[in-house]
Amino acid sequence: GAGVSQSPSNKVTEKGKDVELRCDPISGHTALYWYRQSLGQGLEFLIYFQGNSAPDKSGLPSDRFSAERTGGSVSTLTIQRTQQEDSAVYLCASSLAVGSTYEQYFGPGTRLTVT
Amino acid sequence: ILNVEQSPQSLHVQEGDSTNFTCSFPSSNFYALHWYRWETAKSPEALFVMTLNGDEKKKGRISATLNTKEGYSYLYIKGSQPEDSATYLCAPSNTGKLIFGQGTTLQVKP
């Protein structure tokens, strides 16, 4: 079956512009997670959704970052007024449900470059 | 905030060598530990989810053990092959979100 998909795969944007990153989770997966890996850093958690609700937004680095999920499916991560430090690979993952023992399935990521 | 440490940071071995890596994490409030393999230009792929102290899991030539009391897990690869070249990530989880270590990057030379 179809895995997690993300679009675009690559995005180059100018500093100060807004960007939207999209994630399509595996059908039927109620949990959806966003992570990112900045250059030289490990994978860091940003936010997760249970259905359309986001119980934990603690990883969002600033109020320029927001995310939503609609219909319990597609999620969009929006970064406003992008800065160079936002350059990273943004990964989305989904799992059957929220919980520490559920395996997460990752998408291929969006590589964001802010010039 | 969980502090997750992995060692070594990188490893170069010859084809056929066996190797192992370590993941250390706070033992308090432990629920589960995940191991992932992340190959270049691919998505991270789940290897194991471990929950019980003393648990050992195996997938082909790869196995992992877990010690929740002292807060560590070992990942073993027996008879490394070039296709095992990847970054191996561990991530404890107690709410669902994964807190990743920096990873161990393995390079297997033919």
Image (spheres, coloured by chain):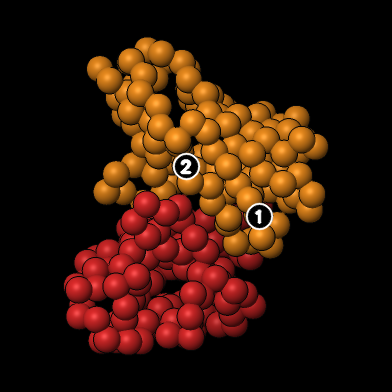
Residue at 43% x, 46% y: name it: B45
Judge the density around disc 1: few (<14), some (14-19), many (≥20) Cα neighbours within 10 Å.
Answer: some
Q: Colour of chain B?
A: orange
Residue at the spot of label 2: B103
* Label 1: element kind: loop
Residue at the spot of label 1: B2
Disc 2 residue type (three-letter): Gly
Return the residue nearer the eye: A70 or A10: A10
Q: In the rendered view of the protein, which quadrant contains the C terminus of chain A?
A: bottom left
Subunit of label 1:
B
Q: Earlier in the sequence, mark 2 or mark 1?
A: 1
On screen, residue B56 versus residue B28, left or right, reads left
Q: Is residue A47 above or below residue B46?
A: below
Q: Is residue A61 above or below residue B1?
A: below
Residue A45 visible in this rendered orientation of the protein: yes
- Residue B74: x %, y % from top left: 60, 29
Q: Is residue B94 above or below residue B72?
A: below
- Residue A70: x %, y % from top left: 47, 85
